[in-house]
Amino acid sequence: MSDPTQPGRLRLGVNIDHVATLRNARGGALPDPVRAALLAQEAGADGITAHLREDRRHIRDDDIAALMEALALPLNFEMAATEEMQAIALRHRPHAVCIVPERREERTTEGGLEVAREADRLARFIAPLAGAGCRVSLFIAPDPVQIAASARVGAAVVELHTGAWCDLVAEGRQQEAEAEFARLRDGSAQAHALGLEVHAGHGLDFETAAAIAALPELAELNIGHFLIGEAVFMGLGAAIAEMRDRMDAARA
Ligand code: PXP
């Protein structure tokens, strides 16, 4: 069992969106995302992530309220930079708010935020959230321009999008995967040097999580779809515990 207070330990945030996807497929109350979050808490997660999308395709408003009520762990509330979501975040004041780009037609969050292009708007958007005590994180590609802009607009954290790298690994495109991994490595170092806390996530599985866990500047990985899928075969608690072990082994 890993020690949550160990310095330099890489935190594991478990994203429970796809428990809600399964629930919504039948329109009832089961499986319950709050039960999954409590199980993740027991199994070694350091935080819970939930994305309230504009179309409410998985997590719904009442899930956020129930998670805030039930959890001892910090909640990382993922949302688009809209007025509606800002009001919800300010009402609940979760530990962290992760701002992501959102397009209705996408299957999942594709690409990162255009922080440099939207710097003024994002700075104005972030200020009240930070003022309410939320740690604001920006989900971005490992692009030096976006990282530098994130530091300027007042974010405390950047989450580097690992989706492109994971896709290249899965497709066996080794050289391109190595180049993308180098962008993640350099981006982590750049963000850390700018005083940002560095997270990473999207598309990670046991192998890619262990590989990226070796980057020393990373403070947190956020992982969802793979863990919920693996839960079908090995159980959610066991999948999270195995992920935790592999991350700790990579850090050691
Ligand atoms: N981090 C962010 C910002 C995300 O949007 C997502 C997907 O909702 C994840 C992490 C988790 O990605 P996955 O479900 O592919 O593990």
Image (cartoon, rainbow, N blue to C red):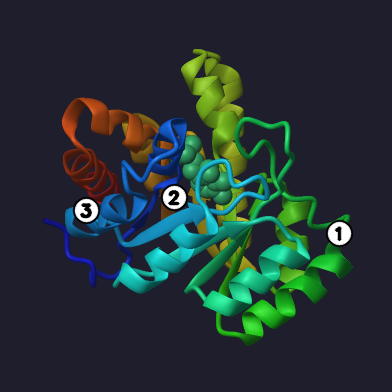
Horizontal side of residue 34 vs 96, given as left or right:
left
Marks 1 and 2 sit apart, C-alpha to C-alpha, by 24 Å
Farthest front residue? 28
Q: Is residue 116 above or below residue 242?
A: below
Query: Which of pointers 2 and 3 indicates the residue nearer the eye?
Result: 3
Question: Quick check: marks 2 and 3 in contact, CB under 8 Å?
Answer: no
Residue 222 is tagged as: 2
Name the residue tied to disc 1. Answer: 118
Q: Is mark 2 within 8 Å of ligand 1?
A: yes
> Residue at 45% across / 68% down in the picture?
65
Q: Is residue 194 visible?
A: yes
Mark 3 closeness class: few <14, some 14–19, many ≥20 residues within 10 Å? some
> Residue at 57% across / 19% down in the picture?
175
Q: Amino acid at mark 3?
A: Leu
Marks 1 and 3 sit apart, C-alpha to C-alpha, by 38 Å
Closer to us: 59 or 166 = 59
Name the residue tied to disc 3. Answer: 39
Closer to us: 54 or 192 = 54
Farthest left residue? 1
The quadrant holding residue 110 is top right
Q: Can you give x and y, in whole percent of width and height, for residue 33 in the image? A: 35, 50
Closer to us: 247 or 39 = 39
Q: Amino acid at mark 2?
A: Asn
Residue 84 is tagged as: none
* Badge 1 or badge 3: first in the primary sequence: 3
Question: Quick check: marks 1 and 3 in contact, CB under 8 Å?
Answer: no
Marks 2 and 3 sit apart, C-alpha to C-alpha, by 16 Å
Q: Amino acid at mark 1?
A: Glu
> Residue at 52% across / 13% down in the picture?
171
Q: Is residue 19 above or below residue 176?
A: below
Q: Is mark 3 within 8 Å of ligand 1?
A: no
Q: Is residue 219 visible?
A: no
